[in-house]
Image (cartoon, grey):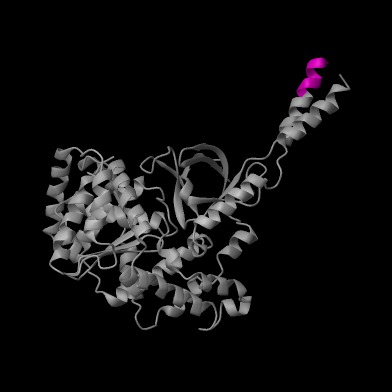
Amino acid sequence: MKKMAWLLVLLAAAALLPAGKALVVQVLRTNLLAQPDFLSAGLCSLQKGNRLELLETQGSWYRVRNAGGVKGFVHRSAVVESKVTLSGIAPGPKGASQDELALAAKGFDEGNEKKLRNSKGFNFADLGWVMEQDVALPALSRFLRDGRLK
Amino acid sequence: MKRLLPVALLCALLVSWKPPVSLSKIKKAKKGMELVSGAAHKINEEEEYHIGRAVAANILGQYTLWKNGALTRYVNLVGGALVLRCQRPETYGGYHFALLDTEEANAFSAPGGIIFLTRGIVEMAGDEDELAAVLAHEIQHIVARDPLKAIRSQRLKALGTFTAGEAVGSRGGALGVFQDSVMDISGTLLQKGYSRGQEKNADLGALELLALTGYDPGALRDMLEKIRAVEKKKIKAFSAHPSAARRMAYVAGNAGPAADSNGREARGARFRQALARR
């Protein structure tokens, strides 16, 4: 009976502990990685607004769990702490809070960028070419190895 | 036992309860706000991305883009290698590196990580490590969000006073603030330059980043030596930066031990190969 009472006390205490910290992806897209290393295997892709539960911090990396229950790593620069505390797993893959969405609508947005597209002195046509220049991770991995880089 | 239970529950509640915001946190946050410029800390990642695209489009309106696919890909590999080890490897739209077709030796970084190198600076670099030194300096400006700090604080204050209708409206509203902010940043990148403190931090951060990536940190000193030689001839090079002689003074004392020279030579070979594709 005594043991049972203490078990109940412990369960009650656990229920009162703060829930896991919630994080929101703040970049357009990134990967949930198997290891705290960009060159490790990607477990699934993450998109802006996806909610994650913080499990552990390892230096500049967060070990997290996504809405589908997949556990992996994201770099801290890819996420922002959510103002809404999660109680366990978030209900859906998307759903930044209204506060977070409001932050993105202050004037430095796509609408105003589009209005500048025909303005004199701006060359958005060539910018399109620049934004397409990207290197895939396997190629970057080879480049590091061949150049004796870390 | 029955008497113990409420006491234990109360203890658990006290242990788990945290005040919404502690006084020390408020003091720490206030101190942080004083250190960061008012303009920079209020802009989120997505806003930085859109203003960065506009600044980059403005730079491309003044310079001719050098659409050399092979060389641009090589520069993106060198830049990408550095980005993996920097303190801010993820930005909203990612880092992109491109070349400008001008003899002027220069480099610019638009907010969010769109980084331009001129043909002049690429041809001035003696090997991959020197090219990496220039890129590492520019990446450090992105890490520190230096371009955003060029926006005059009055612009963001004005933005906060607009109503929803004005925010999406005309030249006098948020669009005007957006355009003026782009000009603030372009003016700093192309003419005025950053403060000496920002430049020094970018150089010191670049030394660290080069070493972390496996490049020779001494390559920054080698590159500055070349820029100094050009400056002596009164040729336009890094016009919005402090003089190379001034930068060399603190870089030399902080470069650390030289890296594996065989590695630098090996990388030099692929640099020459990439440059031959011009």
In the rendered structure, does residue A94 fall within the stretch colored magenta? no
Residue B100 picture location, percent across and down: 24, 68
Residue in the foreground of this view, choosing between B265 and A41 = B265
Residue in the foreground of this view, choosing between B249 and B42 = B249
- Per the picture, the main secondary structure of the magenta-coloured stretch is helix
Query: Which corner quadrant of the image does residue B253 belong to?
Result: top left
- Residue situated furthest right in the rendering: B3
Residue at 52 percent of width and 63 percent of height: B38
Horizontal relation, residue A60 to residue B197: left or right = right
Residue in the foreground of this view, choosing between A94 and B161 = B161
Q: Is residue A57 above or below residue B143?
A: above
Horizontal relation, residue A119 to residue B121: left or right = right
Query: Which corner quadrant of the image does residue B101 belong to?
Result: bottom left
Residue B231 picture location, percent across and down: 17, 65
Q: Is residue B236 above or below residue B70?
A: below
Residue in the foreground of this view, choosing between A32 and B241 = B241
Residue at 41 percent of width and 66 percent of height: B52
Horizontal relation, residue B34 to residue B136: left or right = right
**In which quadrant of the rendered image does the C terminus of chain A lie?**
top left
Residue A9 picture location, percent across and down: 78, 26
* Numbered marks: total: 0
**In which quadrant of the rendered image does the N terminus of chain A lie?**
top right
The answer, for residue B95, to whether it is visible in the render is no
Residue B104 picture location, percent across and down: 19, 69
Identify the magenta region.
Answer: A1-7
Residue at 53 percent of width and 41 percent of height: A64
